[in-house]
Image (spheres, rainbow, N blue to C red):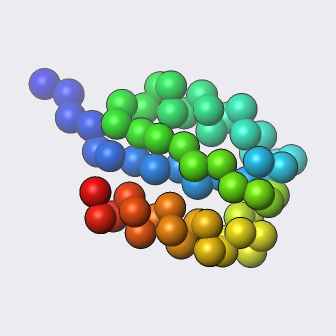
Amino acid sequence: MAMAVPTRLVWGRDNEFQKIEFARRYVRELPASDLIEVAGKHIPTEDSPEKVSVAIFEHLQA
């Protein structure tokens, strides 16, 4: 029996180092995962701290 740990990826849409396409692929391949795209680059906590915080908090509440 395979188990899936709920996983949320929070990714900067304009990340040039790790492209958003990588995140979308991870979500397709990881069971029980989702993706929140935020404005920003490689460190979305600097570019969109409020949206990242909300995304993490909502995920932990679920």
Which quadrant of the figure has residue 59?
bottom left
Residue 2 pos. (x, y %): 20, 28
* Percent of width and height locating residue 28: 50, 25
Above-or-below relation of 48 to 3: below
In this rendering, position of residue 16 left or right of residue 56: right
Q: Is residue 6 left or right of residue 28?
A: left
Q: Which residue appears at 46% of the width and 65% of the height? A: 56
Q: Which residue is located at x 51 percent, y 68 percent?
A: 54
Please identify the quarter of the rendering in which residue 24 is found. Answer: top right
| Quarter of the image where the C terminus is located | bottom left
Query: Quick one: 7 or 62, which is closer to the camera?
Result: 62
Horizontally, is 62 left or right of 17 in the view? left
Q: Can residue 27 be seen in this view?
A: yes
Residue furthest toward the left? 1
As drawn, 8 above or below 25: below
**In this rendering, position of residue 9 left or right of residue 24:** left
**Residue at 32% from the left image edge and 46% from the top image edge:** 6
Tell me residue 11's x, y (percent).
66, 52
Q: Using the image as rendered, state which of residue 41 and residue 51 is in the foreground.
A: 51
Asked if residue 42 shows in the view, the reply is no
